[in-house]
Amino acid sequence: MKLHVWASDFVSLISRLAKASALFLCVGISLISIGLYGQEPVKVTLDGGGPGLRFEGLGAVSAGASSRLLIDYPEPERSQILDYLFKPNYGAALQHLKVEIGSDVNSTDGSEPSHMRSRGDADYDRGYEWWLMTEARKRNPKIILDALPWGAPGWVGDGHIYSNDMADYVVDFLKAAAREHHTEVQYVGIWNERMYNSEYVKALHAKLVSEHLLAKIVCCDSYPGIPFGEWGIVDALAADPVLKGDIAAIGVHYPRERSAPPSPDSARALGIPLWSSEDQPNPGSGPFVSRDWRVGGRILARQYINNYLEDRFTKTEIWSPVTSYYDLLAAPNSGLMYANTPWSGHYEVQGTIWATAHTTQFAEPGWQYLDAASGHLPKGGAYVSLRSTNKKDWSVVLNTIGAPAAQTVAFQVQGGLSSGHVYVWETNNTHTFERVFVIAPHNGGFSYTFDPDSLYSLTTTTGQAKGTAVPPADKPFPFPYLDTFDHSPKGRAARFLADQDGAFEVQSCRGRDGLCLQQVITRTPIPWAPLPDPFTIAGDVRWADYTLSADVQIPTYGSAALMARIDSADVFKDRTALYPSGYIFRVSRDGHWEILSTHFKSPTATLASGVVSDMGQGWHHLRLACHGTTIEAILDARRVAVIDDTSHKSGMIAIGADWSQVQFDNLSIEPN
């Protein structure tokens, strides 16, 4: 708060007294602000009986393999991250968690495991979404859980996602969440950012009812780039009462992107809640979220408020809760937090955590917006007011982002709302989620002068707090590195390896003792994103000179690959690419081998190729070495190629396969 324009000692004294005395502030600040700033304060009346929509809450979307590396974190850092995300009155205090219903298909930054890889298959511990839902609910028993598919296994509907098979697949996921993990999923979607199918919506609703599930349908998680746009379902709902009755909320994605207009009147007229069911504080270029307050935090501070003021969205979900995927993948740094080095335990609590906390720690789902006490400030910024379910407590969330100067607002409280102490919390370049003042209203009224470029919460509630856990220092990926997979849980992913398509899981070795890593998916899934061949990635983009090696066992008609100096693995950069951008050493079961240099949006260059005539059906040893401009490939004890190439100077490693059950053992990364 600031009370200064004049430079005199007298004014400075009054300013200091004002900051020291809540009573002086609440009675006299309006007159001071007029004298100092030469203008009337903005007047806001908080009336507990006023109209407004129900506040549904703020949450985040764990999907697209965005949480992959989180489960590999050691304790206590893993629990600290989860506390910052989900623990009430600690950090973001998320009120919703939406998870992907995995399907072993790339859904942005990797593939999430399916719980049913065939009609007879069932494994309800695969992956990390079950675990994440359980951990979220441990911290906040009232958290609301959502689920949404991005793709589907190939057996579903014989390759058609809108089918009875898919309804069964989704229902099985929901039932398993309750039965196996004691987590009731309250909402479920149709198909992420794809054109809806009215008959499938009705079939899914009928299936939910027949199975006595309480989950309600959100439709249709649409995006401005799809046919008929994000609001394409609206006319169908207006024309079809049965379809309208089957849907609990309309969810749209990235409503502010591409300068999209506000939600249409036809959508608001339906009387169905409108949600921003996937959103992002995207500054428009580069990484999605800045790690400090100045970019991502400021954008999100405006977005949460404007989503209600301009679109009447009563719920916003951010993709993603935590950046737990490698930076060279698509849409880097999307999360409210940053945690993608589990070997170090390091994480970052970003400004977006506190931008979220300014709402979630001051209002709960079920509270009501007060429309007459919500609006835009004349010098820049906006505010929303909400009252509690007891109709006494209230909170105001206000930002002054972009305002050139301080602004004074005079509040009047009436309609049964509490006129007790008002607690003021502030975030900006100098304060991070700090309680900066306590006001004692006089006759239900008080004024406050708000700093520019800041985010505030004013509330009659108590209990808010800022988490205190501090992460260890960051460390690079361990190098040299060796994984024999013998100490990994069978049927699960190996640590630090992030699958980009298909599924690489630890299984018993074929033809040798111990455990190996096997690509287990043999039928291509129904895709959402571009569909490269299966590969799993790890390492450090700064690595330049190293040797990658592994033992491989290749099934008949299969192929295995080692990949080095991967400098990008963003599947959206080239929707036809089978591999990431880097050097690929691929060997087929029939003895054919090749070394490729891949570049997104450029033809793949075959640097060398040949045939080994005596490839047996047992195990083989592959090595791919990079040293300066020299690329060397070895198959068993045979040096098959030495190449001079300058296309890729540094990057991560990966091992890959086609859609066959290739096995890998003794994965090694070592200096040359």
Image (cartoon, helix red, strand yellow):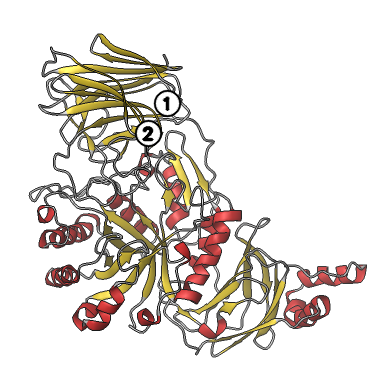
Q: Position of residue 527 (x, y in %)?
A: 23, 50
Mark 1 highlights which residue? 647
Work out whether mark 2 precedes mark 1 in sequence or the reverse, and give the earlier one. Answer: 2
Q: Position of residue 443 (x, y in %)?
A: 67, 88
The amino acid pointed to by label 2 is His
Where residue 515 sits, quadrant-wise, is top left
The amino acid pointed to by label 1 is Ser
In the rendered structure, the answer to whether residue 601 lies left or right of residue 660 reads right
The residue nearer to you, when weighing 471 against 528, is: 528
Assign a secondary structure to mark 1.
Answer: loop
Q: Pointer 2 and pointer 1: residues touching (CB < 8 Å)?
A: yes
Q: Looking at this rendering, what residue extends furthest in the front direction? A: 603
Where residue 274 sits, quadrant-wise, is bottom left
Separation of marks 2 and 1 at Cα, in angstroms: 9 Å
Instruction: Tell me, for residue 442, which label it has, or none.
Output: none
Mark 2 highlights which residue? 599
Q: Residues within 10 Å of mark 2 (few under 14, many from 20)?
A: many
Q: Position of residue 615 (x, y in %)?
A: 14, 15
In the rendered structure, the answer to whether residue 421 lies left or right of residue 658 reads right
Q: Position of residue 428 (x, y in %)?
A: 64, 59
Assign a secondary structure to mark 2.
Answer: loop
**Residue at x-position 44% and y-position 58%:** 87
Residue 464 seen from this side: no
**Residue at x-position 43% and y-position 23%:** 479
Q: Residues within 10 Å of mark 1 (few under 14, many from 20)?
A: some
Image height of 636 relative to 12, above or below:
above
The residue nearer to you, when weighing 111 against 658, is: 658
**Residue at x-position 52% and y-position 42%:** 471
In the rendered structure, the answer to whether residue 103 lies left or right of residue 4 reads left
Image height of 280 relative to 267, above or below:
above
